[in-house]
Amino acid sequence: MADTTKAPERQVTGDYDVIVAGAGPVGLTLAIDLGRRGVKCLLVERNRITAPYPKMDRSNARTMEFYRRIGIVDRVRALGYPPEIPMDVFIVTRLCDPPLAVLRYPSVAECREQIAACRDCRLPLEPYQLVSQNKLEPLLKEVADATPNVTVRYGCELIDFTQDPTGVNVAMRVFDRSEQTLRAGYLVGCDGGSSTVRKKLGIQLEGRGGIQDVCQVIFGSKDLFERIPIGKGRHYNFAHPNGSTIVVQGCRTEFTFHTSLPADTDFEPVLRDLIGFPCEIEIRIVVPWRQHLLVAERYRDGRVFIAGDAVHLVIPTGGLGMNTGVGDAFDLSWKLTGVIQGWGGSALLDAYEQERRPIGLRNRDAAGWAAAGVPIWRRLITPNVRDDTPAGAALRAEIAASANINHRRMHDMRGVEFGYSYAGSPLIATESTGVEQWDTCVYTPHTRPGVRIPHMWLKDGRAIQDLLGDDYTLLDLRGDCETDGLERAFHALGAPFKLLRLDEPEVRQVYGCSVLLLRPDLHIAWRGDRAPENPAALATKATGH
């Protein structure tokens, strides 16, 4: 066969291919994935150190699949909640009193047993993981520092930028107050809810802002977790008028107390009353913040993109903040790579907003729905909730029954976490004419183009996701599909393409098809039972030409 490979022309636009502003989990993850794909990037962070205190505390199953893809999943787990401890959620009056309700959730070890036994692709490849942001960020920084093509600079703040048709000039101020301007092909703002990049682009946020003022009290205790007599879990929600919750961080010696009490409250006696037994308490910092449910009207302006909290601000019920941002990062990284390396068309970058903004809107609304479940049971609380009387017992039973339904909203959003679809994207051979819908709580696995490929075990015990690399992959589950046309089409575009042939009858039956074209992010671009009728058109579509 004649070699029709097109040699891609790599864009050369300045000091770096990409400058990423903001080294939270989203910016660090983006830089790591860009670097491992061969993209030269600079990551700048205005703070001189990684986050000193916890913020997010749960990496969901989809995020842990992503971290498995880049080879760090075990290192992330080593920093967090031990696998054998349950992930239960308690509704309590005090930590010393019998719980009103215990919402049972399996430990990571139990999840792994369930995943190992599952043959119908309804479970993800990886379980969730409790790991605090102040433990995760140093690991991600270490990985970024060791990743080829990545330069990491803390104490370096983006202060301005200008763009033109071929690149972006980025002005930065370092901690000694000196300033420097560097040029890159693209700029990505992962610089948080008060994003300088978003504001300088004039991009507005849409939705509900300033919903409620609350406080996060970060405190340490070496003996609290071990001394809790009512059972070990991750969240302890108090049937108390101040609407408070203690969240156990992965290390079990650091905790966050979420409350509607004002920031100038003397929190130690409040905590001691809710705990109800002697233990060490060290208040470290009180962080007042305001709840929002907002999504940016645009995710891109020319050569400048925004991701993470810079484009979506959500109430953290359900953990859809950082986890949604990690999804942004993995969606954008391979698209930038394709355009920079010359094999991707301009529609690749257009598709970032087209794919991720609907997810941002859906997750914003899901977070709001989850948050709205909490006041339903908290409204039942009266001052006699702790009374040792028949009336007190009846009230506690009523609260427990309501919490068992309404509080579960924030912990049961499996459909949102890994059932989302990019169907309708210009890069996807969408099968239906309508907008793809997915349930908030129920994950229904399928292989219609647009979704991530569901996890399945192969005959030899390997996970199918582990066999799929960083390129486009044609997965032939019968092992005899005619693939020359599609191979030629991708090679003609210079796009990275691999063929994986397997004979997997069980996987074929569960997936409902024999052949799938997978993108570099493992979302399904096309499926069928034989070779595509027009391979050149499919390759052109999938690569954004």
Image (spheres, rainbow, N blue to C red):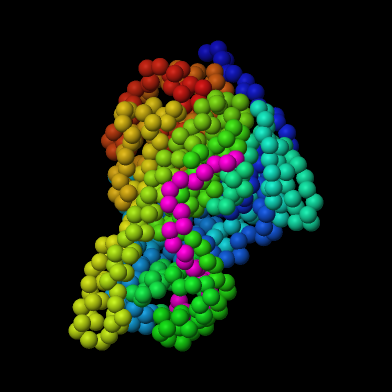
Q: In the image, is residue 534 above or below residue 373?
A: above
Observer able to see residue 124: no
- Residue 130: image x %, image y %? 46, 62
Residue 354 located within the stretch drawn in magenta = no
Q: Where residue 313 sits: x, y (%)?
A: 48, 52
Q: Nearer the viewer, residue 239 or 431?
A: 239
Residue 140: x %, y % from top left: 59, 54
The single residue placed furthest to the top in the displayed view is: 2
**Left or right side of 516 for 36:** right
Q: Nearer the viewer, residue 223 or 280?
A: 280
Whole-percent x, y for residue 363 in the image? 40, 48
At 38% from the left and 65% from the top, the residue drawn is 87
Which residue is at a point 52% across and 39% down the rendered structure image?
Answer: 299
- Quadrant of res 93: bottom left
Image-based side of 339 in relation to 456, left or right? right
Residue at x 38%, y 20% (from the top left corner): 532
Q: Nearer the viewer, residue 40 or 6?
A: 40
Residue closer to the observer: 269 or 338 = 269
Q: How many marks?
A: 0
Residue 164 occupies quadrant: top right
**What segment carries the magenta color?**
201-226
Residue 206 magenta? yes
Give the residue at x 51% y 63%. Answer: 289
Res. 193 in view:
yes
